[in-house]
Image (cartoon, helix red, strand yellow):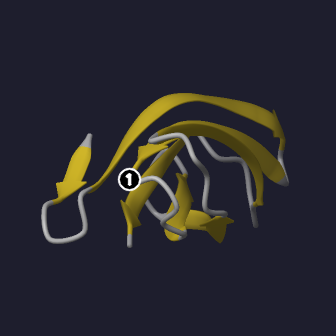
Amino acid sequence: MSIDNANQISHRDIAYEVIDEYSTNVTFEVSRIPGQAVSCDVTVLNQSFAIVGFLTVDVAPSTNRSTVISSTVLTTELGVSGLVDGCR
């Protein structure tokens, strides 16, 4: 979990699923001020902790403080973990 106190944005990794050698699904929760649009950077790593996939996910404004997002990240090789690097 990470928190940006200036903008009151936090994120929490929920799950990841390696679909195949070229894609991984990452599910995470974003909390922010209702009505605030947010962008989150999602990364997939291989067994050597090298980045093999990256995606910036735009989270639309909502009346809810928290939103659960599930995104598929395309990868250059088999990933072994998926996580959110940060939101802004």
Image quadrant for the C terminus?
bottom left
42 or 48, nearer to the observer = 42
Quick one: 16 or 67, which is closer to the camera? Answer: 67
Residue 57, given in percent of the width and then of the height, sits at: 65, 66
Q: Position of residue 38 (x, y in %)?
A: 50, 68
Neighbour tally class for label 1: few under 14, some 14-19, many 20 plus, Cα within 10 Å: many
Give the position of the N terminus as an image quadrant. top left
Q: Is residue 80 left or right of residue 77?
A: left
Residue placed farthest to the left in the image?
5
- The number of callouts visible is 1
The picture places residue 7, in percent across and down from the top left corner, at 25, 69
Q: Residue at x 74, y 44 (%)?
A: 24
Residue type at numbered disc 1: Arg
Q: On the rendered structure, is 79 left or right of 47?
A: right
- Identify the residue at horizontal 44%, vertical 42% (top origin): 65
Q: Position of residue 18 (x, y in %)?
A: 74, 34
The residue indicated by pointer 1 is: 32
Does 80 sit above or below residue 32? above
Question: In this rendering, would 74 be left or right of 6?
Answer: right
37, 87: nearer the viewer: 37
Q: Residue at coordinates 23% horizontally, 58% vertically from top-left?
A: 8
Q: Is residue 2 above or below residue 55?
A: above
Name the residue located 54 percent from the left edge and 40 percent from the top edge.
64
State the image quarter where residue 60 is shown. bottom right
Q: Which element is circle 1 on? A: loop
Left or right, 77 with reference to 38: right
